[in-house]
Amino acid sequence: MYQAIIKEIPEQVRPLFNQGKVADYIPALGKVSPMKFAMAAKAVSGEIYYAGEVDEKFSLQSISKAFAMILAIRMLGDDLWQKVGRSLSARAFNSISQIEEYGGRPRNPFTNGGAIAIVDLLLTHDVHYLESLLILVRKLTGNRKIDYDRSVAKSEKEFGHRNAAIAYFLKSYGILKNQVEDVLDAYFVQCSLAMSCNDLSRSLLFLANRGVDPKNETVVLTPQQNRHLNALLMMFGTYDGAGDFVFRIGLPGKSGVGGGIAVIVPGKMVIAVWSPALDEFGTSVAGLKALEIFIEKGDLGIF
Ligand code: GLN
């Protein structure tokens, strides 16, 4: 039944492809066609349902912050919360004023400031952080070809003045330990992770299965850590768009300005969707609609 629902979705959301805007503040992303679409749902039981270009890679951008958090939760435990809060962000993901208002402490780990602070912590604990992240992501996807897209990272760095401002601002508050340039470089490379909807839906499946990867029974997170990460994704995964996201989708999820969204359906599946044109919160317009249709018709809500 899920396959019958999903295969109708590209046609249903096509009128929305032109309603958002591709993220051209990162020039390498601005070149991607807004007509691209893919959706893949991987079930805990092993089935996969799909529509569109599910094997085409796209830039994960902020979805990479979810993978960074897996390492941060495992490596740092509660120490993590010394540097970032667990409060809703009522401003854009790259807001600077909000950091100042909150005394220099990023409101949560998924705003750009929060994610930059997490990268700093991870670099402090592991000089090979970017390699560790790649090993984790390759293991979770089961795809050894997953890699960073250095041309996207370079493009973002060249025009990443706002993130640089955020990082220097955090440094001035004593939030960052490492050199600002090193933290920024690692953050841009992390955001450049590229994978397909197929890969993405597989990689986060443990989040729908109490922290255990159902493909090989590996414990990725403990049940408590898993509950925490799902809660963080639900509350903060779409920034100041979270109110609308939780109202329409009602599940933990993470967006990225590459146009991808990953959604966790506890106990059942992970849905990954990709459509590059974004709304004002940096969330894919057609992707969000596609998720709403699939969850509604598939009766996948948890409430
Ligand atoms: N790399 C992007 C940035 O820092 C990620 C933002 C996003 O995907 N929301 O601006």
Image (cartoon, rainbow, N blue to C red):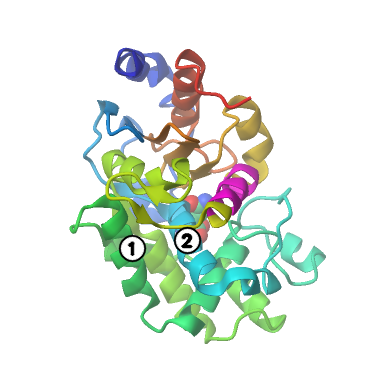
> Residue 166 falls in which quadrant of the image?
bottom right
**Element at label 1:** helix
Residue 65 on image: x %, y %: 48, 58
- Magenta: main secondary structure: helix
The residue labelled by disc 2 is 70
Q: Which mark is residue 136?
A: 1
Residue shown at 66%/59% (left/top)?
108
Residue 236 at x, y percent in the picture: 63, 48
**How far from the left and from the top, in percent, is residue 155?**
36, 63
Left/right of residue 8 with respect to residue 293 in the rendered view: left
Q: Which residues are magenta?
A: 226-237
Seen from the viewer's position, the closer of residues 52 and 98 is 52
Q: Residue at image x 23%, y 52%?
A: 142
Image quadrant where one finds the N terminus: top left
Q: Residue at x 38, y 55 (%)?
A: 27
Determine if the magenta segment contains residue 101. no
Discs 1, 2 touching: Cβ within 8 Å: yes
Residue 146, numbered label: none
